Structures are given as C-alpha cells and as structure tokens.
Image: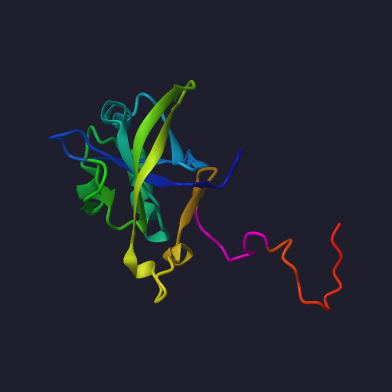
C-alpha cells in the first residue's frame, strides 16, 4: 500500500522488430552513484522477454497529457497492437541503447540491465542509467530544467492523478530563518 507511484512508460525493442511500450508503476531510483533504477515486470508480459533478451530499456516519464496513452499501454499487449502507432506516439532516437524513447515524454532515461531478481509475481530489473534526454521546452533561460512544469502524473490505487501544489522544498523544515524568527528547534 505504498501509494502514489510514478506511472512510467517503458519502451523496449528487439533488433529488426517494432518497438513496444509497457506501463510500469513499480519503478524507482535505487542508487545515485552510479545512477541506477529498477522496474518490476511480470514474466508473462510481452515486454518482459524483450527486456530480458536485449538487456536494455528506456523509462519515459508521464504527464497528464499522456494519461490515456499510459493507461492504454498498460492494458493492451504489444503482441496484438503497435502501441506507438495506436497512441500516435513518436519513437525518439536514444544515444546509448537501441530502444527508442517516447518524444512526447519530458524525460527519457536510457537503461542497461545489470541484474534480474526473480521475486515471485514480478521480476525486478536493476539497471544502470546510461543516458538521459530532456524536453528542451522545460529549460528556462538559465538552462535549469523545470520538470515540475510538465504536468507530471502518478498512479494511486487504480487511479491516475496530476501532481498537486508545491508544499515545500527539500530541507525547508530545517532551513535557518531570519535572525528575528526566534524559532527553536528540538
């Protein structure tokens, strides 16, 4: 019951085949140096064998505008449909892996599998991040990436939600206030 979760679209591709997309809600950062992530996929899924065989995939962050496509790619099988074509998504060239990113996504994270842990209903792919592409429209004039302006969405117990208002910034609870604040910390 750890919700909400990021709902990401993971793209993958075998050589000489059409690329595929699977929606994954069990994805996350697991290490910062080296940058590593994990995704968990059921072995019966079409994308599972592709990722296992190629050892690579791309995590594509999702936005409110991509909610319909995110849901579709999670409930339709790539065995039966071309998800890129059906959802009118654009495959984007990756720099370090053969799998394409999704051009409509604000962030594409290129990954190479380092380990697969067979956990039960899902197998966890632990992967090193080998490249990251960002949509330049979210860069401000100082070239700072404003990801939160992209309209990110999350999945919570069977439902999709846009992220709400900003509540604080990292470390704000211990940030020193002005000299006259008189606030004591315990």
Q: For the N terminus, which image quadrant?
A: top right
Looking at the rendering, the stretch of residues picked out in magenta corresponds to 161-171
Q: Residue 43: percent from the left, percent from the top?
A: 37, 24
Lateral position of residue 19 relative to residue 137, left or right = left
- Residue drawn at (86%, 56%) of the image: 186
Q: Residue 115: percent from the left, percent from the top?
A: 41, 27
- Residue drawn at (31%, 27%) of the image: 52
User: Is the magenta region chiefly helix, strand or loop?
Assistant: loop
Lateral position of residue 132 relative to residue 184, left or right = left
Q: Residue 80: percent from the left, percent from the top?
A: 22, 34
Residue 170 belongs to the span the image colors magenta: yes
Which residue occupies the foreground of this view, 146 or 123? Answer: 146
Lateral position of residue 161 relative to residue 60, left or right = right
Q: Quadrant of residue 111?
A: top left
Chosen colour scheme = rainbow
Residue 31 belongs to the span the image colors magenta: no
Q: Residue 93: percent from the left, percent from the top?
A: 21, 50
- Residue drawn at (82%, 75%) of the image: 181
Which residue occupies the foreground of this view, 83 or 101? Answer: 101
């Amino acid at each position: 019951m750890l919700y909400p979760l990021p709902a990401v679209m993971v793209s993958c591709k075998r050589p000489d085949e059409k690329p595929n997309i699977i929606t994954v809600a069990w994805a996350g950062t697991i290490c910062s140096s080296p940058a590593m992530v994990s995704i968990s996929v059921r072995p019966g899924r079409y994308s599972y064998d592709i990722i296992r065989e190629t050892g690579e995939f791309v995590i594509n962050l999702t936005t409110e505008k991509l909610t319909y496509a995110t849901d579709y790619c999670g409930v339709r099988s790539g065995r039966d449909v071309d998800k890129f074509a059906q959802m009118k998504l654009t495959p984007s060239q990756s720099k370090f892996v053969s799998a394409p990113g999704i051009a409509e996504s604000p962030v594409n994270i290129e990954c190479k599998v380092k380990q697969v842990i067979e956990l039960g209903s899902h197998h966890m792919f632990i992967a090193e991040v080998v490249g990251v592409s960002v949509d330049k429209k979210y860069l401000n004039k100082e070239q700072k990436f404003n990801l939160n302006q992209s309209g990110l969405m999350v999945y919570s117990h069977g439902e999709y939600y846009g992220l709400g208002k900003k509540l604080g910034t990292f470390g704000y609870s211990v940030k020193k206030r002005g000299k006259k604040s008189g606030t004591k910390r315990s």
